[in-house]
Amino acid sequence: MTHKSSRGRNMLQSLLLIGMVSLSAAYVPPEVKQRWKDTQYTMQDAIKIAEECAETGKNSKDRTELFYAVKFLDRYARENYPTYEAKEDLLKRANGSWELRLAVNSDRDEEFYPHPEFRAFATAFSTVTDNYFGKGIGTKDNGFCFVALGGPSTRDIERRQVFMNYEDYFINGQQVPGWDLSYYIRGYQRNWMPAERQRPKLAFTVICVTDKMMAVRGSKTGGMAIFRRIHADMTRPAFGW
């Protein structure tokens, strides 16, 4: 396999994996809970760490500090967003374009790593609207999108979930007709096998959103992801809107 074909394969795999992170909350060791208590750890402390790491694209100096900052935000999200209106506002603030910066593959991993592998020459991003979710790979200046996936999206506001449906495929902002994603990865295709129709929908749960950062967990691989807000609207280069 040539270097170019290997790079292309890695780009497609990374595109498919953007935002696929676990719905289950990871175990928090007693010593970490005690540290939160001893230091009177707050939501603002956790947000500060998450925003700094989202901006730099690097993990915290203490390699597990970022992980437990995000876990703190996740653990106390119900208290931070106690009402339906607060959750609805949170999901509204999640709308926009987001660059993937760091992720963990599993809730067994306590160390975020920079993502994606090709970040030196391209950007992995997601776009969120009230009724459509998409993700793609574009240039560093956010002016061009190589490939993108997307589809109609619904929300469970009470659970702070955004559901994903990848039925559309785009190259350079142009939709490819008749695209069947099952050619590349099973479990996402439009034409489900009968036994597969009962599988839960792909989704991610919004943990925290600020003007700079979004933290989420999703429904597939058992981890979490941190995004940095992109002020450019990526729907046009990705989907041609």
Image (tube, rainbow, N blue to C red):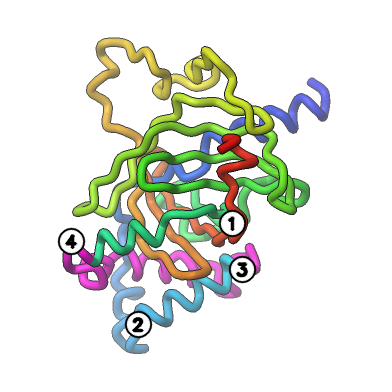
N-term mark: 3 or 2: 2
Position of residue 138 measured from the top left corner of the image (x, y, whole percent): 68, 43
Residue type at mark 4? Tyr
* Camera-side mark, 4 or 2: 4
N-term mark: 1 or 2: 2
Circle number at residue 121 = none
Residue on which the image places disc 1? 101
N-term mark: 4 or 1: 4
* Camera-side mark, 4 or 1: 4
Q: Main structural element of the magenta stretch: helix, strand or loop?
A: helix
Q: Secondary structure at mark 3?
A: helix
- What residue is shown at x 49% (from left), y 54% (from top)? 96
Q: CA distance from mark 1 to mark 2?
A: 23 Å
- Left or right, 80 with respect to 213, comes to left
Per the rendered image, the range of residues in magenta is 56-85
Q: CA distance from mark 1 to mark 3?
A: 8 Å
Which residue is more in the foreground, 18 or 24?
Answer: 18
Position of residue 117 measured from the top left corner of the image (x, y, whole percent): 68, 45
Screen quadrant of the N terminus: top right
Q: CA distance from mark 4 to mark 2?
A: 23 Å
Q: CA distance from mark 3 to mark 4?
A: 30 Å
Screen quadrant of the C terminus: top right
N-term mark: 3 or 4: 3
Q: Secondary structure at mark 2?
A: loop
Residue type at mark 2? Thr
Residue on which the image places disc 4? 84
Residue on which the image places disc 3? 55
Residue 68 is inside the magenta segment: yes
* Camera-side mark, 3 or 4: 4
Residue on which the image places disc 2? 42
